[in-house]
Amino acid sequence: MSASAVVIGAGVSGLTTAVCLAESGMDVRVDTDRLPGDTTSAAAGAMWDPYLAEPRDAVDRWSRQTLAELTALSTDADTGIRLMEGTHESRIPCEMPAWGSVVGALPCPPEDLRDGYVTGWRYRAPLVDMPRYLDHLLRRLERAGGSVRQHRYGSLDEALAEAPVVVNCSGAEARFLADDPSVDALRGRLVVIENPGIEAFFCDDTPGAEELIYIYPHADTVVLGGTAEPGGWELWPDEDAAREIVRRCAAVEPSLAGARVIEQRVGLRPVRGSVRLTDEWHADTLLLHNYGHGGAGVTLSWGCAREIVERVRAAAGTSR
């Protein structure tokens, strides 16, 4: 065994977990079939937003911990994180979500709402340029002595022979790797365009809406979304879907119309009835699971990773 801990998966959950383990003093290796820039995380929007996830109490705790970490990291431009103000708005009357109080969200005056929207709230939160942020996490892991190896596991049993601690952060692939049929892929598409001058984020938060609409500006670009397609595992671009995403977003923000399209991104959100953060012994190897975050991977990343470290430390006191 060449590492004291192996993390499976190089998305935001895997890299953040690996960073926390490495900075706690462990010799960590990330094993992944897809390098960080090719993961679902690299295709995300993304911002701190406690997307629907269970278990509720744990999600509240993990999201608050992650908010504090991302806010602290936003002071370093190299992380790709900026604190940005913007709005969530709804086309039908609804209550502000409970997490609104965490970020000091305030109701929007009617005159500030977009056309067609009847209620909304304004707040300030971390907006994350995911490719840059994943690069930051990778650099931080390497500074802490960790490494990344491109390798695809056929089973968890194979991984258990690699290190005394194994953490499964395989996202949607956990359906197969962990033999967990409760995990499914929710395909998300987004479009990256040149920024025509947008300086605030927008998200349609209409309850029960069939279509996703969000606008996330990142300096020279804007990320437009999106889709939530169940049961699709293919990752190729779809020109019709991309045009429809741009059309929906431009209907909300007309300045987006005609902006040059830079790229499409496609990823598989790992949806599950609840996040799986568990630990179990397999002979002398401690196996931990950290997957099933759905669309809240970024939002829960640091809270879940810190709990993994706590569980590893607790297990060390009762090591077999």
Image: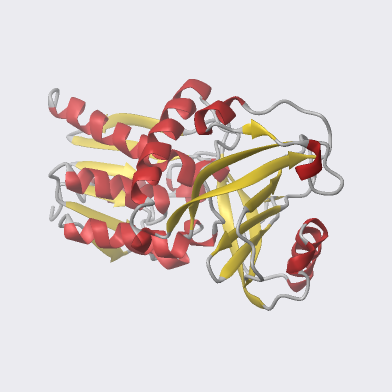
Please say which color scheme the image uses: secondary structure
In the image, residue 230 sits, relative to residue 60, either above or below, namely below
Displayed quadrant of residue 132: bottom left
Displayed quadrant of residue 191: bottom right
Q: Is residue 320 visible?
A: no
Q: Residue at x 19, y 25 (%)?
A: 314
In the image, residue 158 sits, relative to residue 273, either above or below, namely below
Residue 60 percent across, percent down from the top left: 48, 27
**Towards the viewer: 130 or 175:** 130
Q: Is residue 29 visible?
A: yes
Residue 316 percent across, percent down from the top left: 14, 29
Farthest right residue in view: 116
In the image, residue 183 sits, relative to residue 159, either above or below, namely above
Q: Residue at x 68, y 41 (%)?
A: 88
Q: Quadrant of the C terminus?
A: top left
**Towards the viewer: 316 or 58:** 58
**Towards the viewer: 281 or 126:** 126
Q: Residue at x 69, y 56 (%)?
A: 226
Q: Residue at x 42, y 55 (%)?
A: 11
